[in-house]
Image (cartoon, rainbow, N blue to C red):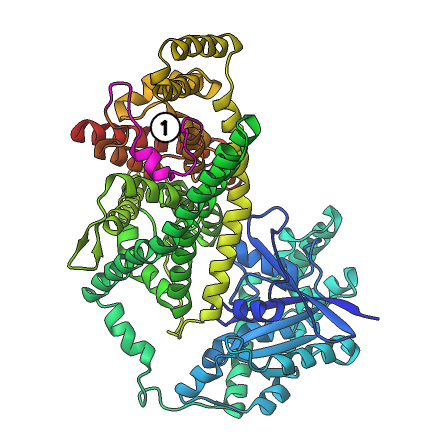
C-alpha cells in the first residue's frame, strides 16, 4: 500500500529551494494562497518509491524561526503546527554549503522542533570554488540528521535524497533528531509549566509558545495561562532569544571547526566579485542596465516578428477559405468573425509573451535581477520607496496581481503602501499585445545602424515612461502618506550562475499556456459577446437599414458592392455595440479616439489584452473579406470625413492611455484585499484614469 506524507520544504532565501522543489515535483504542482494571507502556497507531489508518495509544501524562504515579514510568519506558523490547512509530518531543509555558518542557524532551530529532518546540501560547486571542504559524514554526526549533497540544477543527488527521505519517513520513530542545544535551560521553569499545559511540545516548541503565543491558535484560557506563567517567572523574551542565538552560534562554531576547512578568503577572488565590480559600478553599472533592457526589448520585436507574421498569414488564409466555402448566414459569420477573429487575437501575441518571459527568466536565473534592485535603491529612496520595492515593480512587468502580493516582503508600512499604489503603472504582459498592434500601425519598421529597431525603441520607451511616472507618483504620494517607521534595505546578492535553458523553456511554455487558457478564455468570451452586440441592434433600426439598402441596390445594381459595404458600416453603427460606443464618443473624441476604441476601453477592464480581441471582432464584423489581417483592417479604417483613424497622434495617445490607465478588475480586487479597504483601490482607479486621460489629451492635441 502506498503511504502519503506531507513534507515542508524550507531554507534560507537563495539556497536553491525553488530549484529543488521544481526538480522533485516537475509538473505535479499546485499554486494557491495560505488562508487569510496572500502569500503563495506551492505544493507538489513526488513518488519517492512504490511505498511512499510525498506532498511537498514549498514554504517562503526565511533566515530563522523569529519572523518579521508576512511571508516569514507563514513559514513559522506551518513549522510550529499553527496552520490548520498544512500539517507537515517531516521537514526537508535546504542549506547553502557556500554560506554554511548562516544556514546552520536556521537548521539548528529546525532540528530542535524534534520532527524528522533531512538536510539537502546545495551549492557544493560554489563552496569548492571558495576553497571550502566539508566533511559530510562528520557534519551528519554533529547534527544528528541525514545530510545529502545535491545539485538540483543538474539533477545530481536527487535519487539519494529520495532514499534518505523515504528512510526517515518510514522509520520516523528512530529519526527524531537529538536537541542541538538544550533549550530547557534557557527558561526551565517556564518551559516546564507550558509543557504541563501542552504535553506533546518539545522544549524548543514550548519556548516559542512563551515568545509568540499571542499569534497562535489558542483558546482564551490557554493564552491567559501562558501569560500568567511569563509574569510569575519574569520571563524576558528578548533576553531569552539573544541567549539562545549565542548558544547556537557557539555550537555552530564548534561544528565548523570539526567538519569544515576554509581557505584564506584573500587567496581567491571569485568570478562573482569580479563581475560585481563592473555590473555594480557607480557609472558603468547603470549604462549596462540600460543596455540590457534595450537588448531585451529589441529581441522581443526582432525575434517575434517571424512567428507572428506566420500566425497572421495563417489565420488570414484560414478565414478567407472558410468565408469562401461556408454558406452565408449568421453561423458562418459567427464562426469567421467571432470565433476565428478572437482566436487569432489570442495566438498572434504568444511568441512575444514567450520571448519576453524567457529573457526575464534568464536574467533571474543568472543572478542579475537582484543586482537591479541594488542599483536602483538610491533612486527608489528619493521617491519614498526602498530597494525592496524594485522586485514587486519588476514583477509588475509580468502581472500586477502577484507583484502587489509580493510587496508583503516590505516591512515598512508606508513604503509597502506606496509600492502597492504605483505597481499597476508598470507595463504588465497584458499591455504587450496592445503595444504591439498599435506600434506596428503608427511606427515605421525602420532599422538604424542595420540592427536597432525603431519599433523596439518605442516599446522600450513606453516601459521607461510607465516606470518614470510610477516614481513621480510615489514622490507625490509620500507627502500625503505619513509614517514614523524607519526602513532598511538589506539584500543578499546571489552568485552569478549559468542560466538553465530547461527552466527558461519551461517558463516560456507555462506563460504561453496561462495566456492562452486564462486570458484567452476571457478574450474569446468577450469576442463572441461583442460579435453578438455588433451583429444585432434595435429591430426597428435594423429593418430600416435593410429596407433602405434593398431599395438602393435595386435602383443602382452596378453600385451593389459599394452599397453593401456602406450597409455593413451603417449596420455596425446602429448595432448595440455601436450605440454603446457612440455614447462615449463625446468624452473620448478630444483624445483622438472613435466609438470603436471606446468599446475597447470598456472591455479592457476585464483584461487589457482584450483590446486586441475587441478590435478583431469589431473590424471583422464590418469587413466583407475574410482574409485580410487585423493590422490591415485597422490601418485602412477611416473616419466619417475620410481621414485615417490610426494616425501617429491617435496611436501615441492610445499607447499613453494604456500605459497609465487602471484597466484591470483583478488588480483592483487584490489591492482591496491587501489594504483591507476600498479607499486605496478607489484612489488608485481615480488617479490612474485621470492621469491617463490628461496625458493622452496632451499628446493628441500636440501631435494632431
Residue 160: percent from left, percent from top: 64, 83
Q: Is residue 99 above or below residue 291?
A: below
182 relative position to 280: left or right:
right
Highlighted magenta segment, given as a residue range = 621-642
Residue 612: percent from left, percent from top: 41, 38
96 vs 144, nearest the viewer: 96
The C terminus lies in which quarter of the figure?
A: top left
Which residue lies most toward the right here? 1
The N terminus lies in which quarter of the figure?
A: bottom right
Q: Main secondary structure of the magenta part?
A: loop
Residue 682: percent from left, percent from top: 44, 30
Query: Is residue 483 shown to the viewer in this render?
Result: no
Does the magenta segment cover residue 510? Answer: no
215 relative position to 443: left or right:
right
Graded by Cα atoms within 10 Å as few (under 14), some (14 to 19) or many (20 or more), the crowding at tag 1 reads many
Q: Is residue 507 above or below residue 703?
A: below
Residue 449: percent from left, percent from top: 15, 59
Q: Which residue is mark 1?
A: 597
389 relative position to 193: left or right:
left
Please report the residue visible at 50 percent of the width from the left and 16 percent of the height from the top: 537
Query: Is residue 201 shown to the viewer in this render?
Result: yes
Describe the element under mark 1 as helix, strand or loop: helix
Does the magenta segment cover residue 637? Answer: yes
Amino acid at each position: 500500500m502506498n503511504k502519503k506524507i506531507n513534507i515542508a520544504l524550507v531554507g534560507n532565501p537563495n539556497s536553491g529551494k525553488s530549484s529543488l522543489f521544481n526538480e522533485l515535483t516537475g509538473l505535479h504542482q499546485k499554486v494557491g494562497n495560505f488562508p487569510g494571507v496572500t502569500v503563495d502556497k506551492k505544493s507538489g507531489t513526488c513518488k519517492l518509491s512504490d511505498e511512499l508518495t510525498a506532498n511537498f509544501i514549498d514554504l517562503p524562504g526565511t533566515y530563522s524561526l523569529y519572523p518579521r515579514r508576512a511571508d516569514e510568519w507563514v513559514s513559522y506558523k506551518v513549522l510550529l503546527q499553527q496552520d490548520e490547512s498544512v500539517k507537515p509530518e517531516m521537514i526537508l531543509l535546504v542549506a547553502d554549503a557556500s554560506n554554511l555558518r548562516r544556514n546552520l542557524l536556521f537548521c539548528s532551530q529546525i532540528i530542535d522542533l524534534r520532527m524528522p529532518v533531512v538536510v539537502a546540501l546545495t551549492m557544493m560547486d560554489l563552496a569548492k570554488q571558495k576553497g571550502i571542504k566539508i566533511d559530510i559524514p562528520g557534519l551528519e554526526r554533529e547534527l544528528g540528521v541525514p545530510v545529502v549533497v545535491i545539485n538540483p540544477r543538474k539533477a545530481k543527488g536527487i535519487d539519494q535524497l529520495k532514499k534518505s527521505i523515504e528512510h526517515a519517513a518510514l522509520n520516523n520513530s528512530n529519526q527524531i533528531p537529538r536537541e542541538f542545544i538544550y533549550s530547557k535551560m534557557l527558561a526551565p521553569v517556564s518551559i516546564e509549566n507550558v509543557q504541563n499545559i501542552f504535553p506533546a511540545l518539545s522544549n524548543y516548541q514550548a519556548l516559542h509558545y512563551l515568545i509568540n503565543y499571542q499569534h497562535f491558535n489558542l483558546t482564551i484560557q490557554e493564552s491567559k495561562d501562558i501569560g500568567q506563567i511569563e509574569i510569575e517567572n519574569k520571563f524576558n523574551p528578548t533576553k531569552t532569544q539573544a541567549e539562545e542565538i549565542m548558544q547556537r552560534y557557539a555550537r555552530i562554531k564548534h561544528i565548523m571547526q570539526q567538519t569544515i576547512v576554509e581557505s584564506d578568503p584573500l587567496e581567491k577572488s571569485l568570478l562573482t566579485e569580479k563581475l560585481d565590480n563592473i555590473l555594480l559600478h557607480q557609472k558603468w553599472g547603470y549604462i549596462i542596465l540600460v543596455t540590457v533592457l534595450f537588448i531585451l526589448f529589441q529581441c522581443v520585436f526582432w525575434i517575434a516578428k517571424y512567428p507572428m507574421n506566420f500566425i497572421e498569414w495563417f489565420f488570414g488564409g484560414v478565414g478567407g477559405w472558410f468565408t469562401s466555402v461556408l454558406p452565408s448566414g449568421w453561423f458562418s459569420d459567427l464562426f469567421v468573425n467571432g470565433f476565428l477573429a478572437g482566436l487569432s487575437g489570442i495566438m498572434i501575441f504568444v511568441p512575444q509573451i514567450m520571448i519576453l518571459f524567457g529573457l526575464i527568466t534568464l536574467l533571474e536565473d543568472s543572478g542579475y535581477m537582484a543586482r537591479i534592485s541594488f542599483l536602483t535603491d538610491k533612486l527608489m529612496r528619493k521617491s519614498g520607496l526602498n530597494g525592496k520595492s524594485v522586485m514587486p515593480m519588476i514583477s509588475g512587468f509580468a502581472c500586477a496581481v502577484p507583484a502587489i502580493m509580493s510587496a508583503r516582503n516590505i516591512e515598512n508600512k508606508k513604503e509597502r503602501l506606496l509600492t502597492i499604489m504605483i505597481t499597476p503603472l508598470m507595463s504588465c504582459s497584458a499591455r504587450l499585445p496592445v503595444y504591439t498592434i498599435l506600434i506596428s500601425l503608427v511606427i515605421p519598421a525602420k532599422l538604424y545602424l542595420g540592427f536597432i529597431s525603431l519599433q523596439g525603441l518605442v516599446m522600450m520607451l513606453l516601459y521607461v515612461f510607465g516606470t518614470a511616472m510610477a516614481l513621480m507618483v510615489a514622490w507625490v504620494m509620500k507627502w500625503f502618506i505619513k509614517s514614523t517607521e524607519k526602513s532598511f534595505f538589506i539584500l543578499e546578492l546571489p552568485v552569478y550562475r549559468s542560466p538553465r535553458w530547461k527552466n527558461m523553456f519551461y517558463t516560456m511554455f507555462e506563460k504561453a499556456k496561462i495566456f492562452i487558457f486564462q486570458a484567452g478564455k476571457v478574450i474569446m468570451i468577450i469576442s463572441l459577446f461583442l460579435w453578438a452586440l455588433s451583429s444585432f441592434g434595435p429591430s426597428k433600426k435594423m429593418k430600416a437599414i435593410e429596407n433602405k439598402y434593398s431599395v438602393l441596390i435595386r435602383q443602382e445594381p452596378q453600385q451593389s458592392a459599394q452599397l453593401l459595404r456602406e450597409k455593413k458600416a451603417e449596420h455596425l453603427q446602429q448595432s448595440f455595440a455601436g450605440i454603446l460606443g457612440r455614447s462615449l464618443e463625446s468624452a473620448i473624441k478630444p483624445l483622438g479616439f472613435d466609438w470603436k476604441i471606446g468599446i475597447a476601453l470598456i472591455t479592457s477592464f476585464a483584461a487589457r489584452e482584450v483590446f486586441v480581441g475587441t478590435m478583431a471582432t469589431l473590424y471583422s464584423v464590418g469587413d466583407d473579406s475574410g482574409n485580410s489581417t487585423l493590422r490591415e483592417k485597422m490601418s485602412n479604417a477611416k473616419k466619417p470625413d475620410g481621414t485615417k483613424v490610426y494616425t501617429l497622434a491617435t496611436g501615441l495617445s492610445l499607447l499613453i492611455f494604456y500605459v497609465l490607465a487602471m484597466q484591470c478588475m483583478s488588480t483592483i480586487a487584490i489591492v482591496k484585499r491587501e489594504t483591507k479597504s476600498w479607499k486605496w483601490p478607489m484612489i488608485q482607479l481615480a488617479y490612474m484614469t485621470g492621469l491617463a486621460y490628461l496625458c493622452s489629451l496632451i499628446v493628441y492635441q500636440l501631435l494632431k
